[in-house]
Image (spheres, rainbow, N blue to C red):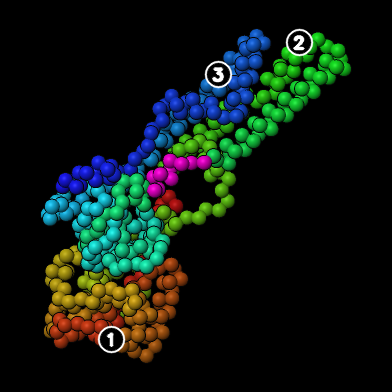
Amino acid sequence: DGEAARRLERYGPNELREGGKKSTFRIFLEQFADFLVIILILAAVVSAVLGDVESTVVILAVITMNAILGTVQTVKAEASLDSLKQMSAPTAKVLRDGTVVQIPGREVVPGDIVVLEAGDAVCADGRLLECASLKTAESALTGESLPVEKAAEVIDGEVPLGDRKNMVFSGTFVTYGRGRFLVTGTGMDTEMGKIAALLKSTSKTPLQVSLDQFGKKLSIGILILCGLLFAVSVLLRGENVMSAFLFAVALAVAAIPEALSSIVTIVLSFGTRKMAKEHAVIRKLQAVEGLGSVSVICSDKTGTLTQNKMTVRQLYVGGRIIPAQEANFKDPVQEPLLRAALLCSDATVNEKGEIGDPTETALVRLGEDFGFDELDVRDQWPRLGELPFDSDRKLMSTVHRFAGGYMLVTKGAVDVMLDRTVLGPGEREEIERVNQTFSNQGLRVLAFACRRLESTEVSLEEENNMLFLGLIAMMDPPRAES
């Protein structure tokens, strides 16, 4: 505890820092730091010197209105940065003085050992020390839709963020398994902190650059024109020097488009309001024009265009394709398929939410739609053994006691399962055709099979000569707004 207190003082609290927030008055003043606006202020000063009160008042009124509009929009949008803070874990279970204690997430320091269980939010970045089938959802950080399987083994060399399987990151959460990790980064030193830092540093938009260039070219052009006019008036026409100067200055003031900044700001404000109605918060007014210039959008799909919520759409059982909503699980042909889907799964769905792989939670939700609670089914046929999912063999198997003995229930990739099931003449070709049909519709397909066992002792050799139960095809539905 003593060392933790010293490190908390040294590294600071485990939270994202906003940095020095600008006051409203400073934001207001920054609206005048534009080349065109500076030219307008100079024009107002010259008008005042020349006694043209009306022009001075109009120019200053336009500039001030423009600054007020920009300030209001910026202040309203500043709150958008706070959303990252809400991803921080409120509490964490850490090992202090040999005992696991629960502390506020902001008090976690580098060097702490944090205990993770399914459903926990990860409070900081860290290196895994222990890992028991640990999976974390990292879509908020990497865009990876499926939970990432973690391992405590050493990784050689520098690898991309998504491939650091022996690390966990702040802002992600545990969907399966358990583990312990050593905290290596907190607050702004985390990967989420780097994103927060990037949000603070913004460059000029294309519109700002082009307006600056236009203002400079316009000003230079006006000055050259007024200089030529002054020279012609004095040298060729023989006019009084003061009269010629006043005329040239008046022309310069008249030629500067006083309303340009205001019109740009007003139009951008309309655009920003329209975007806000579509739930898109724009921090800088000028970014609206940038969006309007976009011709190609590169977007992540899962969780952005789609809901990141796998949903069962089609079944293939008993030689027929059946839409999920028309399934009848009182049918003795269809019931074994759903029961296998619930038993050969680790996901749970309740009023508090969903825990587990999105593919498995889709299977559980399908069962609940037809009155099958996954916990009741698992209580009736408890798991007595298992062969966990392996990405090399693409299968997962569980062992249960059924009437007359033990049953191995297996789910996995269709191509792998077809090589391990006993099929009749033409049956394999038909299943491959159905699988191709589902795949052409953008569906993810799982195959299910089973076989009887003599005991609960199970090895990889048992995942052969199985009875084919059927296919379940699912998809990640698009968001309504996309």
2 or 1: tag closer to the N-terminus = 2
The label nearer to you, 2 versus 1, is: 2
Quarter of the view holding residue 149: bottom left
Label 3: few (<14), some or many (≥20) within 10 Å?
Answer: few
Query: Which residue in the protein does label 3 denote?
Result: 61
3 or 1: tag closer to the N-terminus = 3
| Residue at the image position 36 percent from the left and 38 percent from the top | 18
Q: Is residue 9 above or below residue 228?
A: below
Tell me where residue 400 appears, x and y as whole percent: 16, 77
In the picture provided, is 68 more to the left or to the right than 330?
Answer: right
Considering the numbered disc 3 on the image, is that residue within a helix, a strand or a loop? helix
Q: Is residue 303 above or below residue 155?
A: above
Query: Which residue in the protein does label 1 denote?
Result: 464
Spatial CA distance of label 2 from label 1 is 104 Å
Q: Magenta span: helix, strand or loop, mainly?
A: helix
Residue 242: assigned label: 2
Tell me where residue 243 appears, x and y as whole percent: 77, 11
Label 2: few (<14), some or many (≥20) within 10 Å?
Answer: few
